[in-house]
Amino acid sequence: FFQTTLKMSKDTETIAATLVPGKTRIRDTDGFVATVRYVGPVASAKKTEEIYAGVEWDDATRGKHDGSVISRKTNEIVRHFRLKYPSVIGGSFLRLKTVDIGVELSLKLIQSRYVDEDAPLVAPNNILPFSARTSSGRDKPIEFLGEMKVRKRQQLEDLDDISLRGMGISKGAYGEERELLTKTFEHLRELDVAGNLFSGWEDLFAVLLTFPHLRWFSFASNKIQDIPPQMEVKEGGFGKLRVLNLNKCSIDSFRTVEMLDKICPNIEELCVAFNNFSDMNEGGEDADGVLLPVEPLNGFRHLVHMDFSACNLSSWSSQVHRLAHLPKLKALMLDDNPLTDAIIDKSKSEFQTLENLQIAGTAIDSWAGIQSLSHLPNLKNIRFRKCPLTDIIGSGEVRAGTIARLPLIQILCASKIAEKERLEAEKRYVSNVSREMLQLTKNYNSSKEGGNEFSVIKAFKKLGLDEKYPRFEELVTKHKEAMIVSDSGMGGGTISQNALNVTITSMAAESCTNEPLIKRLPASLKVGRLKTMCARAFGLDVDLQILHFRSEGDDLPSPMDDDENTLAYYGVNDGAEILMNEINVKAQKAEDAKRKEARKREVEEQEQRSNVIHSIRHSEIRAQVAGAEI
């Protein structure tokens, strides 16, 4: 017993010596990954001399506290470490014997990931050694066909791409092991080591030096942080690399991105999403400490694709503009950044080669920012949703408004824009602008001036709307039939009556054989009124109806799930088909039950967090009172 205890003590001392707070990455026995924040005794532990590892989990829900505990001796709060990412329960203390500090990259490790061609079959006779239970309670065998074909394609000597994701690798190969790996995998071109336990740039460089012919490399979800200022970096050392993925690497300085151009001068695709580049608008200081102006990003002469999603970018003018003159940039991902309206200066020839832009989840709250994107001469594909502007209007209105304002785009939110859809969007744009003109003034009356588009344009400019709606003058000439005009200077009437030709088809079991209805409906008709019409025509109660619509060229129908919204809100256009289906009451009840259960769990978790916070605050108050009494 004494010898066993002595051995464990030595083992824990060895482990403790290897743990570097703020750098070392570990995983527990369940495979959850964390960063070490503290190594030492814990005030709340029974054995005050025992050494623990205080960690911050990548998955904050795995933790129990924020790095502070209540001392067993004094009953006061003792903080052992602080979390880098704010959370009430993101931290834990682990016994050193439960800590896994990872393994070294080796040939043996890679071989364990792939099966030899002559290894025993997993599914002899094409049958796996376990079964599935059917609804009738019988066990049914599971077939696995083509095992040998799959195995032949996964032999290491033939593979030019290898995945070692989540294998607990914490250190690159060195010495003879590196030489062996380099020689064995001369043919390797793509490597994925995402989600391991690497913790520094020396690890990244070690892997790249081991496999010098790589063209595609993913190092995502390894918390390597920033390139240290004192680290010597060989310029052009990895010139063969074309694609580099550094998503979720805890990088906090844009300086690191700038240095990548020197390290990988021929990079074509760079992914740095879920890092923090809020300092991107800082220009640095001169020798006298004076702030320097922010300069455009230089270098990256071959960069085509760049992903800056969720990087804490808040300014288009001082941050995003730094990327405006990259000579070959075609795709830019800016999703989930607190960016307000996009600002593109046409006179400065910015983003001249950009074809694909993603700005979903941003803080854009007006059409002005979207309109500004029309100055990008080659923009063809845009992803735009989940922002303040799209939250206050319907998805159909967002899509139509975006298409009308950006005449060059061909794909919106991964859906191709048909020519008919573009025409309908432009007509709606004209209608909306002319309606606003009627609301702004009672003096606007095109019928008094002949009712033609020239008088409308004159009134439009007089109202000062040409800056807000720069395409109106062009489109009112093209779609004058869509213009809403006034009969008496007050908003009434319309040339086309703002009506839509639609086909209403029943998909319900009892009425799916009925002839479809062909109707001409006002765009202002509410969904609730439409359901009443369907109830009369197809005999299905309003409460059991669910409506969708689809336009020509749509792959999937879009739901109309709010009775108070209008056809125009959902973007129903002329020639659309409206589908009436019957709600599956059983499925709906089951879904409601699931939602209630999920809500119940959420409330319980919130209460648990609240109790933890309350306990901590109560202890702090007691400590303050005790201090005051002393």
Image: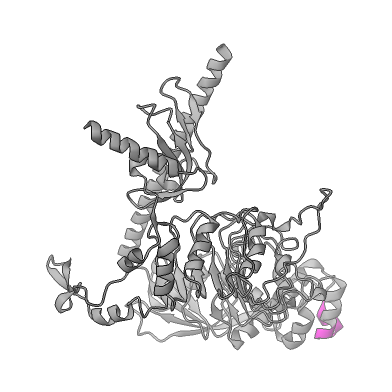
Towards the viewer: 226 or 312? 226
Residue 475: % across, % down: 74, 83
- In the image, residue 419 above or below residue 349: below
Which residue sits at x=70%, y=82%? 482
Which residue sits at x=31%, y=71%? 114
Task: Count all numbered tags in the image, as a single digit.
Answer: 0
Q: Residue 248: in sight, yes or no?
A: yes
Residue 296: % across, % down: 75, 66
Residue 88: % across, % down: 49, 40
- Find out whether residue 72 is within the magenta segment: no
Residue 15: % across, % down: 39, 42
Q: Main secondary structure of the magenta part?
A: helix
> What residue span does the magenta drawing correspond to?
445-454
Q: Quadrant of residue 280?
A: bottom right
Which residue sits at x=32%, y=49%? 29
Towards the viewer: 229 or 414? 229
Residue farthest front in this picture: 176
Quadrant for the C terminus in the image: top right
Taking 579 as reference, is 429 left or right?
right
